[in-house]
Image (cartoon, rainbow, N blue to C red):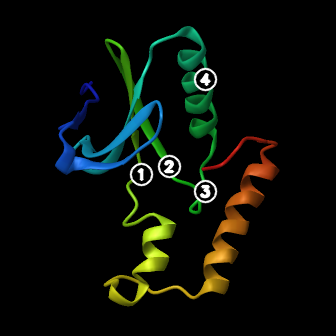
Amino acid sequence: SKKKKIIFNDDEKNKLAESTFSKIYKGSFNNNDCAVKRVYINNEKIKNSIHYEIELLKKLKNQYIVQYYFHEDDKNFINIALEICQSDLEKYLENRNNYSGLILDNIEILNQITLGFDHLHDNKIEIIVH
């Protein structure tokens, strides 16, 4: 069987976002575009937390929730291949008039968020969503 591989370049021009413990880069998984969440693991608590997040993501199959593809351990990091979004909500709302894709009105945006939360609730997942 073909080995699954996450490919990305962790330089600044490929960075999509970052948080305290992770950076998200544009990358590919099995020759398809994806977002690569690269989580720095410097203690057992973070490692356990990210593995819990991965287990939750594996269960969540819904068009309104970013999809999990695969993860791999890499020395002091865990790399997670996720569905790539064209924009985050804040950037989309700020630049909606310059957006070349499907334009959604505020009611449709709220409807999609609600449908995503409904799926989390239906699966009894009570986590902070970001």
Return the disc, 3 or 4, that comes first in the chain's sequence: 4
Write down the residue under mark 2.
67
- For the view shown, which residue lies furthest in the front direction? 20
Could you say whether the residue bearing mark 4 is in a helix, strand or loop?
Answer: helix
Q: Amino acid at mark 3?
A: Asn
- Say if mark 3 contacts mark 4, CB within 8 Å: no
Return the disc, 2 or 3, that comes first in the chain's sequence: 3
- Say if mark 1 contacts mark 2, CB within 8 Å: yes
- Say if mark 4 contacts mark 2, CB within 8 Å: no
Q: Which mark is residue 83?
A: 1
Q: Quadrant of residue 112?
A: bottom right
Q: CA distance from mark 1 to mark 4?
A: 20 Å
Q: How many marks?
A: 4
Q: Identify the residue at horizontal 39%, vertical 81% (top origin).
A: 95
Q: Give the label, 3 or 4, closer to the camera.
A: 4
Write down the residue under mark 3.
62
Q: Identify the residue at horizontal 73%, vertical 58% (top origin).
A: 117
Q: Is residue 71 left or right of residue 107?
A: left
Q: CA distance from mark 1 to mark 2?
A: 5 Å
**Within-10-Å neighbours for mark 1: few <14, some 14–19, many 20+:** some
Q: Identify the residue at horizontal 37%, vertical 23% (top origin).
A: 72
**Within-10-Å neighbours for mark 3: few <14, some 14–19, many 20+:** few
129 up-or-down from 10: above or below:
below
Q: Amino acid at mark 4?
A: Ser
Q: Identify the residue at horizontal 45%, vertical 13% (top origin).
A: 42
Could you say whether the residue bearing mark 2 is in a helix, strand or loop?
Answer: loop
- Say if mark 1 contacts mark 4, CB within 8 Å: no
Q: CA distance from mark 4 to mark 2?
A: 18 Å
Write down the residue under mark 4.
49
